[in-house]
Image (cartoon, rainbow, N blue to C red):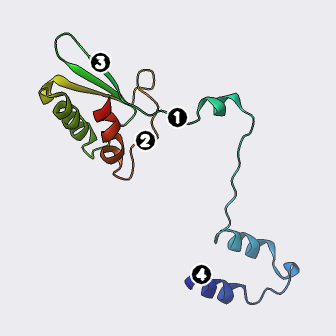
Amino acid sequence: MKTNRYLKKNFKDIKSPGDLDRRDFLKYLGTGIAVAFTVGGSDLLAQRRMPSDLNAYLLIEESGKVKCFTGKIEMGQGVITSLAQMLADELDVKLESVEMVMGDTDLCPWDMGTFGSMSTRFFGPPLRAA
């Protein structure tokens, strides 16, 4: 294993904690120790927990225009087009009549984000069911 060889090579002269000076400690500290801090008991964190129901919100106007509200965000991967196409296909309307409202935190349901090419795969079925 590459990591074990690295550790054996670089830490072979250290027999006890006293053998390590401050500079060496800081150098070795940067090789793989991570420290994380959390804030507990905060009301803000309680508001940010993941909801149990992730859905699409749809508004169908009298004119036939359909608005879909989602927490997904278009970052150049084409999600706005693929989701609009899925919705237009499911509702049997023209693509031009579908408007995607994305990422507006006042209007859209909470969403974990747009990453890993998962938006269409995981958001498509709830969108079609809406």
Give SS at disc 2. Answer: loop
Q: Position of residue 109 (x, y in %)?
A: 43, 28
Q: Residue at x 47, y 31 (%)?
A: 110
N-terminal-most mark, 4 or 3: 4
Check if mark 1's residue and mark 4's residue have beta carbons within 8 Å: no
Q: Position of residue 105 (x, y in %)?
A: 45, 26
The residue that label 1 is drawn on is 52
N-terminal-most mark, 3 or 2: 3
> Mark 1 and mark 2: span between their CA atoms?
16 Å
Q: Is residue 74 visible?
A: no
Which mark is in front, 2 or 4? 2
**As rendered, which of 20 and 6 lies closer to the eye?**
6
- Dot 3: within a 10 Å radius of its alpha carbon, few (fewer than 14), some, or many (20 or more) residues? few
Question: In the image, what residue type sits under mark 2?
Answer: Gly
Question: Residue 59: which numbered mark, if any?
Answer: 3
Question: Residue 3: which numbered mark, if any?
Answer: 4
The residue that label 2 is drawn on is 113
Question: In the image, what residue type sits under mark 1?
Answer: Ser
Which mark is in front, 1 or 4? 1
> Mark 3 and mark 2: span between their CA atoms?
22 Å
**As rendered, which of 31 and 70 lies closer to the eye?**
70
Question: In the image, what residue type sits under mark 3?
Answer: Leu
Q: Residue at x 72, y 85 (%)?
A: 11
Question: Residue 32: which numbered mark, if any?
Answer: none
